[in-house]
């Protein structure tokens, strides 16, 4: 690496805002829980400047909401993949209006079928159907966000921005609303959503990406030998899974992994909860004994889901029936995550007591990257606490994925001052996610993306 991650991230720290609490607030925790959150923030002095208060549906921003959440302290690993740019660089570029390549048209609403569901998406097709240009499928991250990166309480426009950058380079693109979100909704499962408890992650989450690739490959003017998968957060893990298991669909010619999820889902949940409970104990909002009870209950839930298979037995009652404040909020989040099944929450990675949740936990990105042979771009933002670069220990952070690639396959780029949604906040203290969206997209990310796409011209 050109500069030590420890130097870049020394001010990021491990004191992330209690995101598990926020997760439940977003699900209707109410005024009392909000007051607890404010008290914890005041006591902790808003430590952990890289942390954020997630809006509803932010991709992987909370333990009960996203598989990519993390409060690990960020540190200084080295990577065999190629890093780009000194960490001291603080891009100050302002957003610019997209200037699409003349070869790519504007968004058109299209649909395709996947596992009996009609999936809705936006396709930017070649202007000349007799030509031959590359194309990319954009796979979104976790949460209640649509094909553009927008949802209730947040309008990140991240995936539209990615489509704009692709258009500028003459690359057609397709982005879609995943199952449970946007125009796709629950589709055929709307009449009986409980049936989703027995359907696996591959069918509901990975197969639509395969089918989207097949859709692109069949379109006039698309060069099926130049298909790229661009995944963000959980979408990055799906891109790796798709490369390893293409099924009957086309094999990708390239992968772009923006801030990819880097660990097993339940491991991240437990690490997140443990860190938050420890911080709450230090702040006096949870007793040490209650924290231990909740940690043990969560661990037991993980063991049950990993060792068993659905349909799981009916769970017993929560261990702390008289809990209040942060303790009650944490207990409710753990209960939803490991001891309840809620179909829509499952599709947004909030509820794991299902085949989908069990399968999602088995996706391990660092175990997939060694098998990739196509050109890959992988990024991590130095202010990203959801999918951090790493804390210097083996197997931590996005660096663990980058280190798995064979030499020469992947380019690993650190994004100075950049948060999970690819906004460059520089050195600013901006924990609020909505406030982060006022900042420009990372110029370093854009430059690396453009340079990567040039190989497909």
Image: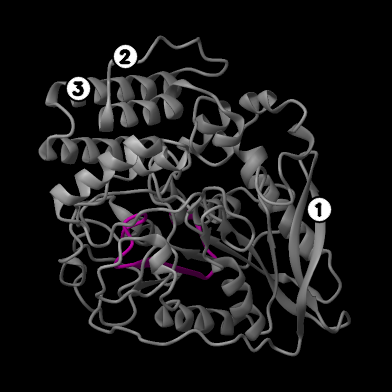
Q: How many marks?
A: 3
Q: Is residue 200 above or below residue 68?
A: above
Q: Is residue 382 magenta?
A: yes
- For image coordinates 32% across by 31% down, the residue present is 330
Percent of width and height locating residue 11: 16, 66
| Quarter containing the N terminus | bottom left
Q: Nearer the viewer, residue 435 or 390?
A: 435
The residue indicated by pointer 2 is 321
Sort mark 3 into few (<14), some (14-19) or many (20+) by Cα contacts within 10 Å.
some
Percent of width and height locating residue 34: 33, 42
Q: Is residue 128 above or below residue 57?
A: below
Camera-near label (2 vs 1) is 2
- For image coordinates 45% across by 55% down, the residue present is 369
Q: Is residue 162 above or below residue 215?
A: below
Q: Label for residue 112?
A: 1
Q: Secondary structure at mark 2?
A: loop
Residue found farthest to the front: 31
Sort mark 1 into few (<14), some (14-19) or many (20+) by Cα contacts within 10 Å.
some
- For image coordinates 45% across by 50% down, the residue present is 60
Q: Label for residue 235?
A: none
Q: Is residue 145 magenta?
A: no
Q: Alpha-carbon distance for marks 2 and 3?
A: 11 Å
The residue indicated by pointer 3 is 290
Q: Are marks 2 and 3 in contact (CB under 8 Å)?
A: no
Q: Quadrant of residue 355?
A: top right
Residue range corresponding to the magenta coloring? 370-388
Q: Alpha-carbon distance for marks 2 and 1?
A: 47 Å
Nearer-N-terminus badge (2/1): 1
Horizontal side, residue 283 vs residue 91: left or right: left
Q: Secondary structure at mark 1?
A: strand
Q: Is residue 85 above or below residue 211?
A: below
């Amino acid at each position: 690496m050109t500069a030590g991650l420890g130097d870049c991230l020394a001010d990021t720290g491990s004191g992330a805002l209690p995101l598990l609490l926020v997760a439940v607030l977003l699900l209707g925790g109410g005024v009392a829980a909000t007051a607890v959150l404010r008290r914890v923030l005041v006591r902790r002095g808003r430590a952990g400047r890289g942390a954020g208060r997630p809006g509803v549906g932010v991709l992987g921003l909370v333990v009960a909401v996203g598989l990519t959440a993390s409060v690990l302290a960020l540190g200084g690993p080295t990577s065999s993949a190629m890093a780009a740019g000194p960490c001291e660089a603080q891009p100050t570029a302002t957003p610019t209006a997209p200037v699409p390549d003349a070869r790519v048209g504007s968004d058109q609403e299209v649909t395709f079928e996947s596992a009996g569901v009609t999936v809705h998406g936006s396709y930017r097709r070649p202007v000349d159907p007799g030509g031959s240009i590359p194309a990319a499928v954009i796979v979104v991250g976790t949460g209640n966000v649509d094909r553009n990166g927008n949802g209730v309480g947040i309008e990140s426009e991240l995936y539209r921005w990615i489509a704009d950058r692709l258009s500028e380079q003459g690359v057609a693109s397709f982005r879609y609303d995943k199952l449970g979100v946007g125009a796709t909704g629950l589709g055929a499962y709307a009449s009986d959503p409980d049936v989703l408890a027995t359907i696996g992650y591959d069918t509901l989450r990975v197969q639509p990406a395969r089918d989207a690739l097949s859709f692109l490959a069949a379109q006039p003017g698309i060069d099926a030998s130049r298909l790229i998968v661009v995944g963000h957060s959980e979408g990055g893990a799906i891109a790796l899974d798709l490369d390893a298991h293409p099924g009957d669909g086309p094999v990708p010619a390239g992968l772009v992994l923006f801030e990819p999820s880097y660990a097993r889902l339940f491991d991240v949940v437990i690490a997140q909860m443990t860190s938050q409970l420890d911080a709450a104990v230090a702040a006096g909002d949870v007793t040490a004994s209650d924290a231990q009870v909740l940690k043990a209950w969560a661990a037991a839930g993980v063991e049950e889901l990993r060792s068993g298979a659905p349909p799981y037995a009916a769970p017993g009652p929560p261990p702390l029936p008289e809990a209040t404040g942060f303790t009650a909020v944490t207990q409710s989040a753990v209960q939803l995550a490991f001891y309840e099944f809620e179909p829509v929450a499952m599709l947004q990675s909030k509820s794991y007591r299902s085949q989908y949740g069990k399968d999602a936990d088995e996706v391990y990105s660092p175990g997939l990257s060694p098998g990739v042979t196509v050109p890959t771009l992988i990024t991590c933002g130095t202010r990203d606490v959801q999918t951090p670069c790493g804390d210097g220990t083996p197997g931590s952070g996005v660096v663990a994925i980058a280190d798995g690639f064979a030499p020469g396959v992947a380019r690993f780029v650190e994004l100075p001052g950049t948060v999970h949604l690819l906004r460059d906040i520089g050195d600013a203290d901006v924990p609020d996610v909505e406030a982060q969206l006022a900042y420009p997209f990372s110029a370093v990310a854009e430059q690396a993306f453009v340079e990567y796409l040039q190989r497909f011209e």
